[in-house]
Amino acid sequence: MTESLVELLRHYGMYAALVSIGLNVLATISGVFPTFFITAANIALFGFWTGAFISFLGESLGAVTAFLLYRAGFRSSAQSALNRYPRAKALINAQGREAFQLIFLLRLLPFAPAFVSTLGAAVGKASLPLFTTASTLGKIPALLMEAYVVLEVTRFQVTGKIILVVLALWLAYDVAKRLRNRPQL
């Protein structure tokens, strides 16, 4: 997948960064496509720091755009979607400093579904400036961690292999936990 994205971005030449930012915005809005593939392509094409910065811009702009779209058109349907995430309900009722802290902390988790915090904030009482600030500040360390993981995994040296083993163990644990907690028919 990463190679395909790199080739796509190379095709756009000097506009590759803008296309990447646009892809990140679309991925962030949809909440379906994981953005770490775009981050991997950006790092492969632009280098670590520039690639991470381009991904950061795309994800930050995507979060703000998603917030505005969710707030404008999806408020009622969003309530039902958030019922699957009980922890997001705290964000819906949060205001001020509490909302800032929740959004910031949710953004710190690099592989957490960002749409949950965006949707929760959009449906809730958080203002656009508060959301933008908390989301952007929380995204900085999260994206740097994500970029480092992507870099190490693509290098596939000792650190990358350790990361893959830890991720595989975490995934196996998560799947086993979900299977145990699944209601019996």
Image (cartoon, rainbow, N blue to C red):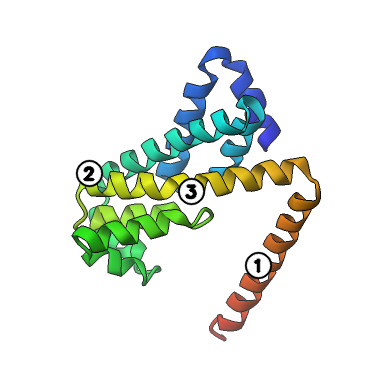
What residue sits right under mark 2 in the picture? 129
Please say whether residue 183 is visible from this viewpoint: yes
Observer-side mark, 2 or 3, equals 3
Element at badge 3?
A: helix
Q: Secondary structure at mark 2?
A: helix
Local packing at callout 2 (Cα closer than 10 Å; few below 14, some 14-19, many 20+) is few
Residue linked to disc 3: 141
Q: Which residue is mark 1?
A: 170
Identified by mark 2, the residue type is: Pro
Circle on res. 117 = none
> Within 10 angstroms of label 1, few (less than 14), some, or many (20 or more) residues?
few
In what element is the residue under mark 1?
A: helix
| Residue 116 placement (x, y as % from top left) | 39, 58
Q: Give the mark, 1 or 3, whose residue is nearer the N terminus.
A: 3
- Of all residues shown, which one is farthest toward the right? 157
For the question of whether residue 32 can be seen, the reply is no
Asked if residue 122 is positioned above or below residue 165 in the image, the reply reads above
Q: Nearer the viewer, mark 1 or mark 3?
A: 3
Q: Amino acid at mark 3?
A: Pro
Residue sitting at 56 percent across and 82 percent down? 181
For image coordinates 39% across by 39% down, the residue present is: 60
Q: Check if mark 2's residue and mark 3's residue have beta carbons within 8 Å.
A: no
Q: Earlier in the sequence, mark 2 or mark 1?
A: 2
Q: Marks 2 and 1, Cα distance to the nearest angstrom?
A: 35 Å
Q: Which residue is at 57% across, 47% downward?
A: 146
Task: Check the image and report above or below for 16 versus 21.
Answer: above
Identified by mark 1, the residue type is Trp
Give residue 37's position: percent from left, percent from top: 61, 40
Disc 1 and disc 3: Cα gap in Å? 21 Å
